[in-house]
Each structure stands twice: as structure tokens, then as C-alpha cells.
Amino acid sequence: MSAVGNRIMKRVAGKGRGWVFTPKHFADLGTRASIDMSLSRLAKSGEIRRIGRGLYDYPVRHDRLGDLTPDPGQVARALSAQSGAKLAASGPAAANSLGLSDQVPTKVAFATSGKSATKKTAGRSFSLKHSRAPVLDHVPDSVNGIVQAIAHVGKDNMDDDAIRRFADRIGKDDLRRLNRARPQMPGWMSDVVGKIERARGG
């Protein structure tokens, strides 16, 4: 294994099994050509797995089932790194995870700050839909999920009951981060965050 390949594998192993990555994750270790060649060799040797164009993973291995399918969230984060666009849970998925909706999304979908697209990776189709709501930087996934859930419920359906349900499900730290991000939101969403805060405080 080359020196670049050794450094790549050391980083991959440090992240642990299940990590999904792109050549961009190793840009500091060598030239793009040397990184691409090393990743190709590591994939051929079975150290890592190629799961899509420019996408690889360090697969979780099961004693009986072999290499498991990569986690959709890990794939989404790698797609984000690959494209440079920001990703968040889709509105329906976020609303379901918050307990605001009983509807379980049937497709793997994410909101993106970039263009809408469908990606096929590891035998799955990933729907990336351009988000009209902001996808925030430097916040936990849970905060961006709340933003997308608010957008999914929509201005016209954001009645007192919906506000109360959001207030019951948002923790203090996430609410503080949402408050700081209000200038990045459309006016009606900023107002909703304010109402959630008042409902939670009351």
C-alpha cells in the first residue's frame, strides 16, 4: 500500500465502520490523482467499498450477512460533502421524527440547499429536494430538522395546536439555536419560532 493509501486507511479506520466518504475527505493527504488511485486500490483489495460515483464506505460487517447496506444518513452527509450543498432531513421525515405526523416517508429523501436531484447509491435512490426553508450552518441535525418540519407544516396550518406540539417536542438548547438563526428565516417562520418559545415558557 502506498504512503497516501496508508494515511487514507488510517483516517477511515479512525472514523469507524459505517463511515461514508468521498475523495474530498482526503484532500489534505495528497494530489487528487494519488487519492483517487489509492481509493481505487483500497476498494479492489476489499479494505473499503465503492458504493457510487465518487462515494465509498467502510462497511459494517455482519457475521452471517456480510457487508451491510450503508446508513442513509451517512450517505446523505457524504453527498453533501461531494456537492458542497447543505442537507437536512426532509420536511415529512422531520415531522415524523418529532412525532408531529404519523406518516412514515416511503422514500429516502432529504432537503438540500442545492438543486433538486435524484441520486442512486448502494442500490438505493436518494431524492434531494431544494429547500425553500434555510438549511442552517453549524447546528445539530435536530435543529435543521425542526426548521424543515416547520416549513412542512406550513404557514396556513400553524395554529395554536401545532405551536403547542412543537413546543412540547423541542429542547431548550435547540430552541436557543433556533432563536439565534431567526434572521436567516422567512418572516413567518421567525414568528413561529417566537410563538414556540412563548408556548414553551408558558
Image (cartoon, grey):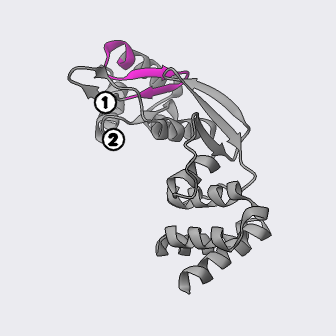
User: Would you say residue 106 is visible in this rendering?
Assistant: yes
Q: In terms of depth relative to the viewer, which is nearer, 148 or 103?
A: 103
Compared with residue 198, is residue 165 higher up or lower down, i.e. above or below? above
Considering every residue shown, the one lying at the far left of the view is 63
Compared with residue 192, is residue 63 higher up or lower down, i.e. above or below? above
Chain part drawn in magenta: 42-57
Mark number displayed over residue 45: none
Residue at the spot x=22%, y=20% of the render?
Answer: 64
Rendering quarter of residue 182: bottom right
Which amino acid type is marked by label 1? Val
Residue at the spot x=56%, y=87% of the render?
Answer: 202
Q: Is 108 a magenta residue?
A: no
Q: In terms of depth relative to the viewer, which is nearer, 68 or 77?
A: 68
Percent x, y for residue 37? Answer: 45, 18
Q: In terms of depth relative to the viewer, which is nearer, 170 or 55?
A: 170
Percent x, y for residue 141? Answer: 51, 55
Mark 2 or 1, nearer chain start: 2
Total numbered circles: 2
Percent x, y for residue 111? Answer: 65, 45
Which amino acid type is marked by label 2? Lys
Q: Which residue is mark 1?
A: 60
As helix, strand or loop, the secondary structure at mark 1 comes to loop
Q: Does 116 sit left or right of 168 as displayed?
A: right
Rendering quarter of residue 20: top left
As helix, strand or loop, the secondary structure at mark 2 comes to helix
Q: Residues within 10 Å of mark 2 (few under 14, many from 20)?
A: few
Rendering quarter of residue 69: top left
Residue at the spot x=66%, y=61% of the render?
Answer: 150
Q: Is 52 a magenta residue?
A: yes
Q: CA distance from mark 2 to mark 1?
A: 12 Å
User: Would you say residue 89 is visible in this rendering?
Assistant: no
Q: Which residue is mark 2?
A: 15
